[in-house]
């Protein structure tokens, strides 16, 4: 009886890994699985699946998107905070404005130098 109690979780994990392998046979993983099920699925893959199948590629890709996380819906990806990836369009406009000002000032200076050079000759 004690053996059945101890082997119960292992049997569930193997079943989850096999379930994952069956789900990935079409080249994509449709359901969500725990990280342990992903590990078991990769471990249980046959040699021919490792060499020729698309299932393991699908499983590796799904490890980032189809993981069950407590308190989150299935397939919700972790994202960077909006503040870390925000683009400040005002700063970009200011930079281009500064570049334009430098170009205009350079053109004006070149025109002034050319005007003085012509004046000195004449």
Image: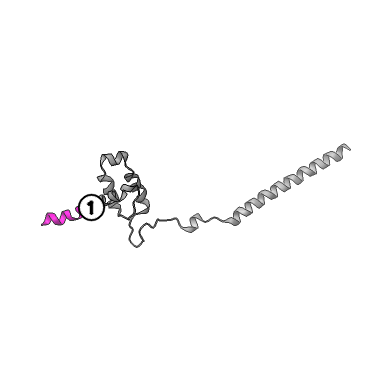
Q: Residue at x 73, y 47 (%)?
A: 105
| Residue found at the very far top of the displayed protein | 121
Residue 103 x %, y %: 70, 46
Q: Is residue 40 magenta?
A: no
**In the rendered view of the protein, which quadrant contains the C terminus?**
top right
CA neighbours of label 1 inside 10 A, class few (<14), some (14 to 19), many (20+): some
**Overall secondary structure of the magenta section:** helix
Q: Residue at x 66, y 51 (%)?
A: 98
Q: Which residues are magenta?
A: 1-16
Query: In the image, 32: left or right of 121?
Result: left
Q: Residue at x 32, y 42 (%)?
A: 53
Asked whether 87 or 22 is in front, the reply is 22
**In the rendered view of the protein, which quadrant contains the N terminus?**
bottom left
| Residue found at the very far left of the displayed protein | 1
Judging from the image, what secondary structure is the residue with disc 1 in? Answer: helix
Residue 117 x %, y %: 83, 39
């Amino acid at each position: 009886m004690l053996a059945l109690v101890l082997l119960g979780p292992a049997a569930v994990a193997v079943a989850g890994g096999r379930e994952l392998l069956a789900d990935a046979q079409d080249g994509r993983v449709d359901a969500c699985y725990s990280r342990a099920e992903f590990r078991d699925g990769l471990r249980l893959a046959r040699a021919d699946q490792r060499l020729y199948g698309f299932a393991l590629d699908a499983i590796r890709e799904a490890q980032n998107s189809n993981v069950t996380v407590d308190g989150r819906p299935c397939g919700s990806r972790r994202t960077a905070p909006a503040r870390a990836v925000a683009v400040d369009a005002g700063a970009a406009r200011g930079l281009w404005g500064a570049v334009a000002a430098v170009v205009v000032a350079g053109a004006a200076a070149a025109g002034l130098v050319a005007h003085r050079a012509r004046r000195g000759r004449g």
